[in-house]
Amino acid sequence: MSRLRLLVSITALAVLGTTLAQAAPQRIVIVRHGEKHTALDLCGLGKERAQALAAQYLSPTSPMSLIKDDPPAAIMAMTLHTVETARPIARAWDMKLIAPPIGYIPIHNNRYFNAKLNVVNRDVARDLLENPRWHGKTVVMVWEHFHIASAALEQEFAGEEVTLRQLLHLDKIKGVKGGVPTTWPDSNYNFFWILTYDRPQDTVPSRFEVVRQYFAEPYANLPSNGWGKPEARPANSGCS
């Protein structure tokens, strides 16, 4: 190889390395799907929560919106329940929902199915931290709680990185009192985790914020239980 061609190749690799290093989003907004009825669909509360998210906390126009002045570059989902929750949000923004093929089949809580979701989680997390398309942008993730944070899932797949807590290095965030929770409780559908990256080359978020959902009318009836506390549901809610 001539000296000129070698110099060009080295320069190209340096530019590529710089681009990949400066790829992290500015914000990642993570929310769990709504309450479930069956493996196929949300219950009435879950459907209402999905509408409420689109109308208020994740609305393009509501004063309550976490992203009104920061339009998302993508709205992502990973499973059937998350797809159903995310659809009203995507419609509110007139955006296409991003979801893998596995996101359109009923979820199965077994090792085989979870292993497939683990692959999805790894691919999404890697893309968020390495793909320049997300640089400086906000991404909304409507996600399945086992794959946000679950000590049990991490133990089942010991030696692998399977949760967003691992893959996005949430255990390394500084200044979080008590640390980022190791498990997202089964009973909680009413919180956001918001990750902020001050510099695009960072792979560890600089800030971690927890936002509890308190909806205004006409959705003020939606449960808003404390972290790890039971959810108060109507007797005839139909939620599993």
Image (tube, rainbow, N blue to C red):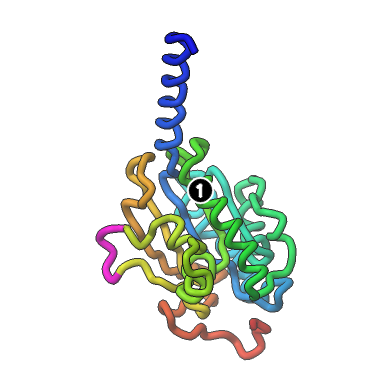
- The residue shown at (45%, 15%) is 6
- For residue 82, above or below residue 61: below
Q: Neighbour class for label 1 at 10 Å: few (<14), some, many (≥20)?
A: some
How many numbered dots are placed on residues in this image? 1
User: Is residue 212 highlighted in magenta?
Assistant: no
Q: Which residue is mark 1?
A: 126
Locate residue 166: give its quadrant.
bottom left
Locate residue 237: give its quadrant.
bottom right
- The residue shown at (64%, 82%) is 239
Q: Kindly give the residue lying farthest to the front in the view shown.
A: 1
Q: Along the horizontal axis of the image, is 78 left or right of 145?
A: right
Q: Along the horizontal axis of the image, is 3 left or right of 121?
A: left
- For residue 52, above or below residue 38: above
- The secondary structure making up most of the magenta span is loop
* Residue 102 or residue 219, whichever sits in front: 102
Q: Which residues are magenta?
A: 173-178
* Residue 66 or residue 176, whichever sits in front: 176
Q: Along the horizontal axis of the image, is 192 left or right of 240?
A: left
Locate residue 179: give its quadrant.
bottom left
* Residue 123 or residue 67, whichever sits in front: 123
Question: Residue 164 location in percent, x, y?
Answer: 48, 60
Question: Residue 233 location in percent, x, y?
Answer: 57, 85
Looking at the rendered structure, the kind of residue marked 1 is Arg
Question: Residue 136 location in percent, x, y?
Answer: 43, 39
- SS of the residue at dot 1? helix
Q: Kindly give the residue lying farthest to the bottom in the view shown.
A: 235
- For residue 137, above or below residue 46: above
- The residue shown at (50%, 65%) is 148
- The residue shown at (54%, 43%) is 73
* Quadrant into which the C terminus falls: bottom right
Question: Residue 139 location in percent, x, y?
Answer: 51, 49
